[in-house]
Image: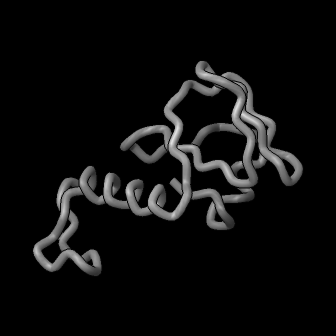
């Protein structure tokens, strides 16, 4: 949605792009790290997740896959069973 009119804290509404930027800034303020890279391989099993990317190899306990502004499934095995249980789009 281009304009969100019923989001708490934004009485006059806010556009989706600006809201996303504010959420990213807030997450980074509390220690989140944002990396922009093309992912070639992902190992998401176990406590530590590993991403082989165009920039480097990243490891962490949590991975947020943000693929763009249009909601769409990734098409990976097991995805359907996890929708609503930590997988959202």
Please say if 63 is above or below 88. Answer: above
Task: Tell which of 22 and 65 is nearer to you.
Answer: 22
Residue furthest top in the image:
54
Q: Quadrant of residue 59?
A: top right
Name the residue rendered at 63%, 27% in the picture. 39
Q: Position of residue 54 (x, y in %)?
A: 60, 19
Name the residue rendered at 18%, 72% in the picture. 5
Residue furthest right in the image:
46
Q: Is residue 9 visible?
A: yes
Name the residue rendered at 49%, 38% in the picture. 67
Q: Quadrant of residue 15?
A: bottom left
Q: Position of residue 18 (x, y in %)?
A: 24, 54
Q: Quadrant of the N terminus?
A: bottom left
Q: Quadrant of residue 11?
A: bottom left
Q: Position of residue 47 (x, y in %)?
A: 85, 54
Please say if 5 is above or below 54. Answer: below
Residue furthest left in the image:
12
Name the residue rendered at 82%, 48% in the picture. 48
């Amino acid at each position: 949605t281009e304009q969100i009119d019923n989001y708490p804290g934004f009485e006059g509404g806010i556009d989706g792009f600006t809201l996303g930027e504010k959420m990213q800034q807030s997450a980074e303020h509390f220690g989140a790290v944002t990396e922009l890279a093309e992912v070639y391989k992902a190992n998401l099993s176990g406590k530590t997740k590993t991403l082989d990317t165009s920039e480097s190899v990243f490891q962490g306990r949590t991975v947020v896959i943000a693929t763009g502004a249009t909601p769409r499934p990734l098409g990976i095995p097991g995805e359907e069973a996890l929708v609503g249980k930590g997988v959202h789009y």
